[in-house]
Amino acid sequence: MSRIPHGRRAAIALALAVAGVTSACGGNAAPTAAPTPVFPSGADTPGMTAGGAAPGMSGMPGMPGMRPPSGAPAAPAGPNAVTIDNFAFAPATLTVPVGTTVTWTNRDEEPHTVVATDGSFHSPGMGAGATYSFTFTKPGTVAYVCSIHPFMKATVQVTP
């Protein structure tokens, strides 16, 4: 093992310990508990910086090392906004007056659609960060689903 760099030797030793191999001769030694690995940030992990984040990858609050997709519009704010997150519409029921434009924003990494079960609207497939808007012109309750994931259901209640 003298030709293997020091950091790599530690990784190989850890892998062998986790696998239960404790004898260098290949014998059937009893498995031992794996030690807790300690890797100094940046020393044995090329491309990493202190704290474990990749260089230049900051910006998303609460998610070290992550940033929002470039060009992704900000989610609409306000009472006429619906978000698609974690394969669900939120809020599941939205109440708005006639003439209101509702905007849906896909916060999932998977594509989604917004499709009224009465056929009154049908969005195109929306990738991450995409939005779709529709103006409700008559009162009633409109149920909608994601046509890609039909278990995703919600309603818009339109008041006169």
Image: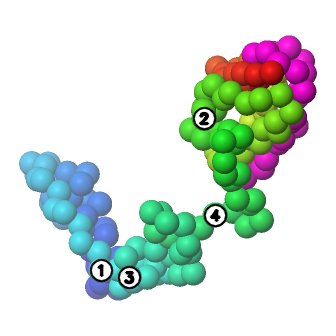
Contact check, label 3 and label 1, Cβ < 8 Å: no
> What residue is rendered at 74% in x and 60% in y?
72
Q: Main secondary structure of the magenta part?
A: loop
Q: Residues within 10 Å of mark 4 (few under 14, many from 20)?
A: some
Q: Which amino acid is tagged 1? A: Pro
Secondary element at tag 2: strand
The CA distance from mark 3 to mark 2 is 37 Å
Residue that badge 1 annotates: 40
Closer to the camera, 59 or 142? 142
Residue type at mark 3 is Ala
**Which mark is first along the chain, 1 or 3?**
1
Q: Which residues are magenta?
A: 117-142
Mark pair 2, 4: CA separation: 20 Å
Lower sequence index among marks 3 and 2: 3
Residue 68's tag is: 4
Q: Residue 22, position in %: x, y?
A: 15, 58
Left/right placement of residue 106 relative to residue 126 reads left
Is residue 65 among what the camera can see? yes
Q: Which residue is mark 2?
A: 90
Left or right: residue 104 versus residue 87 is right
Q: Dot 2: within a 10 Å radius of its alpha carbon, few (fewer than 14), some, or many (20 or more) residues?
A: some
Q: Is residue 52 above or below residue 107?
A: below
Question: Looking at the image, is mark 1 or mark 4 earlier in the sequence?
Answer: 1
Q: Nearer the viewer, mark 3 or mark 2?
A: 2
Disc 1 crowd, CA 10 A, few/some/many (<14, 14-19, 20+): few
Q: How far apart in space, not on screen, are marks 3 and 4 (Cα)?
A: 21 Å
Question: As shown in the figure, which amino acid type bears the numbered disc 4?
Answer: Pro
Residue 131 among magenta residues = yes
Question: Which residue type carries mark 2?
Answer: Ala
The answer to which quarter of the image holds residue 112 is top right
